[in-house]
């Protein structure tokens, strides 16, 4: 979800205050690029080695639909719990839950990516070094989120969004990832306008998101949820891993590049809608355009390019 920070001024003043500029794409692009840097580390790894992140294994249509429903339910339940806690003004409980969630995510990502990275440095590739470095990174991440200033917190949120999204993209089959992203984009519309996300944004005089430090970031005149960054990077990562395994690098990178262009184009539309509405779901347009650009390039353009390259060498 994308939102303008709320003040005590009339609604018309709030909406007029925000005007889209290209710089607003900066955090989104930075998160995607950081995620792709993480993806580069694990490209040589077989996807079968990824830890399970869904309750249903396999890539059958029923498994993909089941996993998509599971993700939507998980996100919806978490949002409802946060909203109910905000209504009760249980700020300590909220902060405790966020600390646990973000610490667990940081530890998981640190262990996963460091395990791959240390594989390139045999002299340091042992369990003690892996655990020690993971603990240090997790501690620094928690300090950045909960103790340091807003700039440091935003950098940490942008980074974890990219890394976590690519982790999901690596762990999920392509069709499961596509359905999860599509289901979540549809749910995002409901959640913002009729469901718990919009109510959180409007709660406590419009400052509900400010109580969820670590699950959102603020940049100039907007607030954006961490989930948007995660799912943008999940999209680009899923497309990169799938088509790279089929065509190899660099040809397999082309659909990923076009998906990034689609996400940024969808984000521009989202920001223009934000100028009018003051709050707008962050997933539908970027996910729709990102998937369309990446999949059309991968399934229709790449085979033609690949065939042309083969013929050129004959």
Image (tube, rainbow, N blue to C red):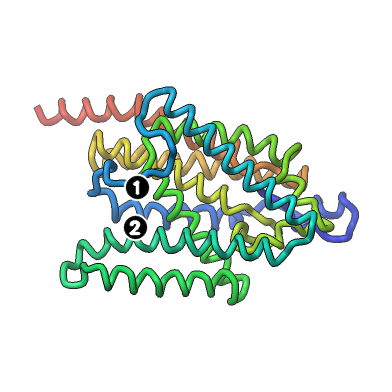
Q: Name the residue located 47 percent from the left edge and 42 percent from the top edge.
A: 261
The mark total stands at 2
Please provide percent x and percent y for residue 37: 36, 56
Q: Residue at x 25, y 34 (%)?
A: 246
Please tell me which residue is depicted at 47% across the width and 33% down the height of the picture. 67
Classify mark 2: helix, strand or loop. helix
Q: Residues within 10 Å of mark 1 (few under 14, many from 20)?
A: few
Q: Is residue 175 above or below residue 21?
A: above
* Eye-nearest disc, 2 or 1: 1
Do the residues under discs 2 and 1 have CB atoms within 8 angstroms?
A: yes
Task: Point out residue 293 in the picture as x, y percentages from the top left corner.
Answer: 45, 33
Observer-nearest of 58 and 124 = 58
Residue 226: quarter of image: bottom right
Q: Nearer the viewer, residue 140 or 41?
A: 140
Q: Which residue is mark 2?
A: 112
**Side (left or right) of 279 relative to 7:** left
Residue position for label 1: 51
Label 2 crowding class (10 Å Cα cut-off): few <14, some 14-19, many 20+?
Answer: some
Distance in Å between CA atoms under marks 2 and 1: 9 Å
């Amino acid at each position: 979800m994308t939102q303008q920070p709320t003040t005590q001024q009339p609604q018309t003043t709030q909406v007029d205050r925000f005007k889209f500029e290209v710089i607003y794409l900066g955090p989104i692009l930075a998160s995607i690029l950081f995620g792709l840097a993480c993806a580069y580390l694990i490209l040589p790894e077989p996807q079968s080695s990824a830890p399970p992140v869904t309750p249903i294994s396999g890539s059958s249509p029923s498994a993909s639909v089941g996993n998509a429903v599971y993700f939507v339910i998980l996100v919806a339940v978490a949002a409802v719990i946060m909203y109910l806690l905000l209504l009760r003004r249980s700020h300590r409980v909220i902060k405790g839950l966020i600390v646990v969630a973000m610490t667990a995510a940081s530890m998981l990502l640190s262990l996963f990516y460091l395990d791959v990275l240390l594989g390139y440095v045999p002299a340091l590739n042992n369990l003690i070094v892996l655990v020690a470095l993971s603990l240090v990174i997790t501690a620094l991440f928690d300090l950045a989120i909960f103790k340091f200033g807003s700039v440091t917190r935003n950098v940490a949120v942008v980074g974890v969004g990219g890394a976590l999204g690519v982790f999901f993209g690596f762990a999920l089959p392509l069709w499961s990832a596509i359905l999860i992203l599509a289901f979540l984009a549809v749910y995002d519309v409901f959640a913002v306008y009729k469901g718990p996300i919009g109510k959180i944004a409007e709660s406590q005089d419009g400052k509900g998101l400010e109580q969820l430090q670590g699950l959102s970031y603020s940049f100039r005149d907007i607030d954006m949820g961490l989930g948007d960054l995660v799912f943008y990077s999940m999209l680009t990562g899923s497309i990169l891993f799938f088509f790279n395994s089929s065509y190899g690098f660099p040809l397999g990178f082309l659909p990923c590049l076009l998906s990034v262009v689609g996400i940024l184009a969808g984000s521009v539309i989202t920001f223009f809608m934000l100028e009018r509405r003051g709050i707008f779901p962050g997933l539908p347009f970027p996910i729709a355009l990102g998937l369309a650009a990446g999949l059309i390039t991968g399934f229709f353009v790449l085979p033609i390019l690949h065939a042309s390259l083969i013929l050129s060498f004959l």
